[in-house]
Image (cartoon, rainbow, N blue to C red):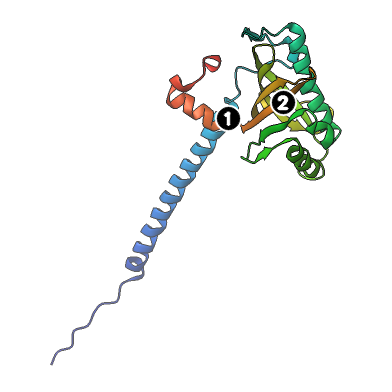
Amino acid sequence: MSTVTTAEPTPVQAAAPASRRRTAWRILGGTALAVGLAAAGGYVWLDATSDPRNLGQSDCTAVASARVATPAGKASAQDQRDVCATLEALADAWGRADSIGYGEQFTDDATYTTYVGTHYQGRQDIADAHRALFGGFVKGTRLADSFLGMRFYGPDTAVVTSRGDTYTGSREPAAADLTKTQTYTLVRESEGRWRIASFHNTQRQGVMERLSFLWDPATAPRAEQ
């Protein structure tokens, strides 16, 4: 009976598949690196070109306000100054870490929605939360605002929109660097003082906004076109 023997692969034959595998891994690795670098470069470009065009005004009283007349009357230039004074008092109280003074700028039944979606109801709720915040997450910070618009609906209701952020130190950030968009609804109360009845804060996602405008330019607000 004959015996069939199988020839052992030569070193050259054995090395060939291993060499091909290494080459394939190098190609895959190089491709992944190129894709990663392209993605990183694209993100850097998007981030660098995502500054808003509508930066607003640092001086609240310099905003050109719209004043709609109602049967109750129409707001005056003094009303605008008084609204701005309330917002200035709000920022001052924040800078002093004064939760009572901060809450005092809101109506007793005010609502307050943060950029993470936390919803506070009532002046006391707002003041209590900020007492904790001033001693923790936002300790030592100040408020920066750049005002986008102001609308009065009759003599007793105003809506103010702004870009805003917190900062530390003595130098306020530039308007383009403010990362939040805010809406204040203010009312004149019976004693004549303007207070905030509702506040809503939204985190601006600059890169996502830029992507959406590139994908469909029609989604861009007129001020950003």
The numbered mark at residue 112 is none
The numbered mark at residue 206 is 1
Q: What amino acid type should be assigned to the residue bearing mark 2?
A: Ile
Q: Quadrant of the N terminus?
A: bottom left
Measured as percent of width and height from the top left, residue 99 is found at: 82, 37
**Residue at point 65%, 11% (across, down):** 154
Measured as percent of width and height from the top left, residue 29 is found at: 46, 50
Res 173 visible: no
State yes or no: discs 2 and 1 in contact (Cβ < 8 Å).
no
- Whether 53 is drawn above or below 31: the answer is above
Q: Residue furthest bottom?
A: 1
Query: Would you identify the image quadrant in which residue 155 lies?
Result: top right
Q: In the rendered image, which residue does mark 2 sit on?
A: 196
Quick one: label 2 or label 1, which is nearer the N terminus? 2
How far apart are labels 2 and 1 at the CA level? 28 Å
Query: Would you identify the image quadrant in which residue 174 lies?
Result: top right
Measured as percent of width and height from the top left, residue 192 is found at: 78, 17
Measured as percent of width and height from the top left, residue 164 is found at: 70, 27
Residue 171 relative to residue 150: left or right: right
Query: Would you identify the image quadrant in which residue 100 lies?
Result: top right
Q: What amino acid type should be assigned to the residue bearing mark 1?
A: Gly
Res 78 visible: yes
**Residue at point 70%, 9% (across, down):** 75
